[in-house]
Every structure is written in structure tokens, then in C-alpha cells.
Amino acid sequence: MNVQSTLRAPITFEGVGLHTGADVRVEVRPAAVGSGIVFVLDDDIRVPAVAENVVDTSRATVIGGKGKSVSTVEHLLSALFGMGVSNAEITVWGPEIPVTDGSGKMFADAIARVGLEGQDAARAMMRLERAFEMRTGDRAVIVLPADAFRVRFLADFPAPVGTQYFDSEITPAVYFEEICAARTFGYLHEVEALLARGLARGGSLDNAVVFDERGPMQPLRWPNEVVRHKVLDLLGDFALLGAWPCCEIVAIKSGHDLHVAVARALRARELVEHTYT
């Protein structure tokens, strides 16, 4: 993870957007050393994938600039980040990233299939000089100095989901085997309310785990698939640091808004040392 890398070949995805229901297409291309992850919107508007360019987190993470934006970027960013891609150009035709099966598996599978090309430059590493935390109500993200990147996530939802916990060092192997296939989720009554308001137009039992009062309406991939998806989302949001974290993240009931706020604060505060090692 100390060396910059990009894709060996372009990868393309097509499908429906979860929130808009629109048909969308995305191409992820190799990129030069030091370019980072950049979205290309309307063929010529370039928007770096950094926390300062997030324009909304109400239902998904939305990146924007110069009057244009793309929604639901977190699953694709999670796959690129978790699989170790530091430089890539993402061209998007449509208002959001395809939902695929509601996880990052299709993206991670494609990255694994084409492989990564190491680049002759050190990767930016984010190292903390002291602990940092951000809280809102009973939700919190605590970031601690550490020698490796580790995530501890406590999720707590109404029945039948309940309380779930995930704890692991984050490496490409762990991401591929333990995180990327965890699907987005919701409650049946919430889905019905969203559909009644004309939202979640692309949502279905094919791209989200839905819980009714008895439990999940589809087979789970893990007993704690919900918290694994929360970790997937967190990694997509922390990709917006623009550096690989050497720290431990303790997340308690957090979501996109808090993740992005922490990433933005870490990029700005003196307690973060960006080194190249």
C-alpha cells in the first residue's frame, strides 16, 4: 500500500441508479502518477474525489463541482480505495453511479480481473499526531494514531437488525473477502415510504437487503451483513482523504454525513501529517 497504483486497463459498468432509477454508465480508466481519483462529468468537468467536493450526504455521498454532480459514489470509491487503487479517472454518463447488486462486489471483481499496475512513486499516507473525534448525539467517529489502518464499527438499528459489530485491519485481501459483497439495506416500511414519495426509484430486492418485522426478506451473505455494509460505506467516504490512512477508526452508529465531516476535518487540521513513505 506504500506505492501508488492504477488499473492495468479500463473497466466499464452500466445499470440503474438506486435513487433516480436512471440508466447510467461509468468508465474507470487508468490515471497518471499523483492524479488521485477524479470524476469526469459531462465529458469535460473534472471533480477530484476529495472531501471538500462533497455537496450532499442526505441519502448518499454526492460529489460535485461547477454546477454538476454525481450521486451514490460511495460504493465505487470504496472498491477503488479498498482494493488499493490510488489513481483513476471515472467518467460518468448519468446522475449517479449504478447500484449493481447494492454492494461493491461488481466493482471489486472488475478491479481484481484487470489487476493493478504499480507506479514509480510513493503513496500519500495519512498519519495522526494525536487522537481526533467528532460526535453528534449518540453517533461518533474517533480516529486514533496507529501503525496500520483498522476499522472498528458498532451499528445499532431497530429490530430485527439490532446491534452488530465489525473489527478488522483493512487490506485489499480483507476488503475483497470480508467487505465488498455486503449489500445496502433498509426496512420494508421505509422503502414503501420512499417509493410513495418518488424516491429510491431504482431500488429492488435485487439490489438491497430489505427487512420486514420478521427479518431479512432475502438470504444474508453474513449474519452481520448490515455492519459490513456500513464499513463499506465508511471506506468509500474515507477514500475522500486522498491518502491511505495509518490510523484506527472507531465508528459508532455513524453515517455519510459524519464520515465526510471527519474526512474534511482531517484534511484541514494540523494534527494530520501527510507523508510519503
Image: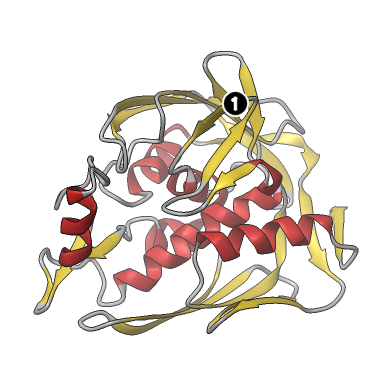
- The location of residue 130, given as percent across then percent down, is 84, 77
- Which picture quadrant has residue 249? bottom right
Query: From where the camera sits, is residue 116 visible?
Result: yes
User: Which residue is rendered at x = 26% and y = 71% of the image?
Assistant: 222
Left or right of residue 131: residue 9: left
State the residue position of label 1. Answer: 67
**Is 114 or 86 nearer to us in this picture?**
86
**Is 108 or 187 nearer to us in this picture?**
187
Query: From where the camera sits, is residue 143 visible?
Result: no
Q: Secondary structure at mark 1?
A: loop
Left or right of residue 112: residue 257: right
- Which picture quadrant has residue 145? bottom right
Q: Residue furthest front?
A: 197
Q: Is residue 55 above or below residue 166?
A: above
Amino acid type at circle 1 is Gly
User: Which residue is rendered at x = 44% and y = 50% of the image?
Assistant: 60
- The location of residue 240, given as percent across then percent down, is 64, 49
**Is 104 or 254 nearer to us in this picture?**
254
Number of other residues with Cα within 10 Å of mark 1, as a class: few under 14, some 14 to 19, many 20 or more: few
Left or right of residue 90: residue 204: left
User: Which residue is rendered at x = 87% and y = 73% of the image?
Assistant: 129
**Is 123 or 116 nearer to us in this picture?**
123
